[in-house]
Image (cartoon, helix red, strand yellow):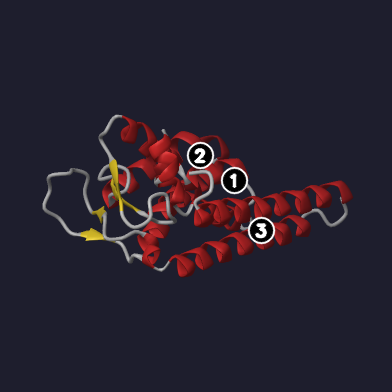
Amino acid sequence: MAAITTEKGRAMIAGHFGFAALVKSRERQAPLWALMLATVWLDIVFVPLFVAGVETITTVGRPGGYGAGIIHADYTHSLVGAIALSLVFGLAFGWRWGSRTAIVLGLVSFSHWVLDLLVHRADMPLFPGHDLNQPRFGFGLWRHPWTAASMELLLIVMGAWLYWRAACAITVEDDKARQRARLVSLLILIGGIVVLGLDVSGIGG
C-alpha cells in the first residue's frame, strides 16, 4: 500500500474531486458523495489489481513526485475498460435516483479517463490486455508539473464556486441551508487545495 500512496497518490485526485463538485452544481439530483466516488471509481478498482500485481506502476523522475508514475493499468485505464467500469458504476449506484442520475454518474466516472488523458504520459491503451500490440495515449502534462497543477487548481476553484452559487440559488430564504452551502463549498476548496499541495510537494508519500 505504501507504493500506491507514493506513486499513484501523486495523481490528479484533487482535480477529479473539483470536477465532481462542478457537475453537482448542475445536477442537483445526484448526491455529492456519489459524484465524488464516481470520479475516482477507476482508481478504486485499480487498487486491488495493483496489490495483486495485475496492474503496476513504473516510477520516472523523482520518486513520489507529482505525476512521477507511468501506469500499466490496461484493465482500469484502457478506453474500453474505463467505459465498461463506468457503465457498471452508473447502473450499480445510479438506479435509485433515476435513469438520468445513473447516466450522469456513469459519465462522471468516465471523466476520470478523459482527465487522465490530459496528464498521463502515453500509457493508456484502447483495450484491456498487457500483451496486445496497440497504441497508447496520453498528452503528458505531468512532464510540466506546474501546468498540470494549475489545471487541477482551476478545476477545484471552479467546482467550489459553482457548487456554492448553485446551492445558494435554491436556498435563498433558508439561512441554515445557505450556511451549509457555504461550509460545503469551503470544504471542497480547502480540501482540494490541501490534497493538491500534498501531491505537488510529495508530502505524505
Q: Which residue is mark 2?
A: 94
Look at discs 3 and 2 and give the one toward the viewer: 3
Circle 2: element type: helix
Q: Residues within 10 Å of mark 3 (few under 14, many from 20)?
A: many
Identify residue type, mark 1. Ala
Residue 23 shows in the view: yes
Q: Which residue is mark 3?
A: 160
Identify residue type, mark 3. Ala
Residue 27 shows in the view: no
* Residue 167 pos. (x, y %): 73, 55
Identify residue type, mark 2. Gly
Above or below, comparing residue 202 to residue 45 in the picture: below
Q: Which residue is mark 1?
A: 30
- For residue 1, which quarter of the picture? top left
Residue plotted at (45% across, 46% down): 9
Residue plotted at (34% across, 65% down): 140
Label 1 with label 2: CB-CB less than 8 Å: yes
Q: Residues within 10 Å of mark 2 (few under 14, many from 20)?
A: many
If you read the primary sequence from the N terminus, does the residue marked by circle 3 or circle 1 appear first?
Answer: 1
Residue plotted at (40% across, 39% down): 4
* Residue 29 pos. (x, y %): 62, 47
What's the distance in space between the residues labelled 3 and 1, CA to CA? 16 Å
* Residue 94 pos. (x, y %): 51, 39
If you read the primary sequence from the N terminus, does the residue marked by circle 3 or circle 2 appear first?
Answer: 2
The residue positioned farthest toward the front in the image shown: 62
